Amino acid sequence: MTTQLSLFRKLEHLLKGMIYLFFATVFFTNHPTLAMIADEIRDEIIIPIQQSYFLELSENGYEPPLIPTLPDEITPSEEITPTAAEKQELTEGNKIIIRYITPPPPAVTVSEDELWTAITAYRRDHGKSDLNRSDSLCQYARRRADELYNRYLANPEDPLDNHAGFQRDADSGYLFESTGFSHVGENLAFTPGYATATQIIEWAWDTSPGHRSLQLSDEVTQACLTGKHPVYVGMYGY
């Protein structure tokens, strides 16, 4: 048996050398015909020789090593699959490639409650009285926010109308009829770089003298703040 094992060893080294040169040629040339021949050599020569070799070893008391096999399609296990990721299947030749794409972070959302909390804290910090949130001002403010957001989608370089819509509604009387107030003021902000209500009120409106004066006014008693990122509206009345 020693002679037979030695013969197998010699054949193994010879075949390894030849196969190494062949597969190196396939790798560097990337020739489809050679690749097909390589698959046939693997299936018809290499695997049978390995099986015969390990059979001889096992008959003489040797434990053949386990040869790991890889599936044609590799998919992440349930433990490592990101639950928030989107599964995408791509076909390449006769194989299906599965990959997981993490969705983009959600768009910034600043709620009316967050804006109201921020304006209340802001006025208190400046020694001003609290305001009442007006439903009628909120309805009008949301209408203006929708109008300006649609303008932003159509013309992102010029999203605000310099209060043109507000002046239009004041001239027609709609502003006062819809809100029920005889004095109404409007603050507008375009803040694509801000993500919190405090930033909008204290970094955007507070840095403008006109906006600061309105949101710190001693005359206004009612207000409402709303918006669709990155466009925000502050409406104040008395």
Image (tube, rainbow, N blue to C red):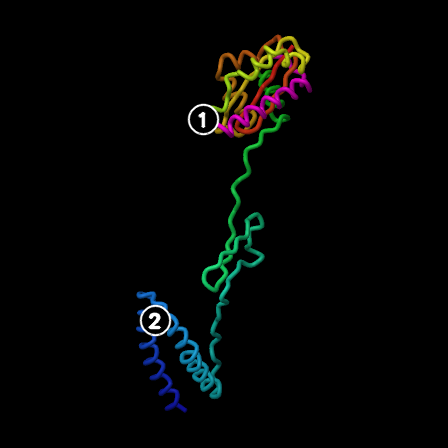
| Residue 214 versus residue 189 in the image, above or below | above
Q: Can residue 58 be seen at all in this image of the molecule? A: yes
Residue drawn at x 40%, y 80% is: 45
Residue 9 appears in which quarter of the rendering? Answer: bottom left
Residue 61, given in percent of the width and then of the height, sits at 48, 86
- Find disc 1 in the rendering and name its residue: 157
List x then y, in percent, for residue 78. Answer: 58, 57
Q: Which residues are magenta?
A: 128-155
Q: Position of residue 160 (x, y in %)?
A: 50, 21
Of discs 2 and 1, which sits in the foreground? 1
The residue lying toward the viewer, choosing from 132 and 235, is 235
> Is residue 54 toward the left or the right of residue 181 in the image?
left
Residue 23 bears which disc, if any? 2
Q: Quadrant of residue 118?
A: top right
Report the predominant secondary structure element of the magenta stretch: helix
Residue displayed at 46% across by 82% down: 51
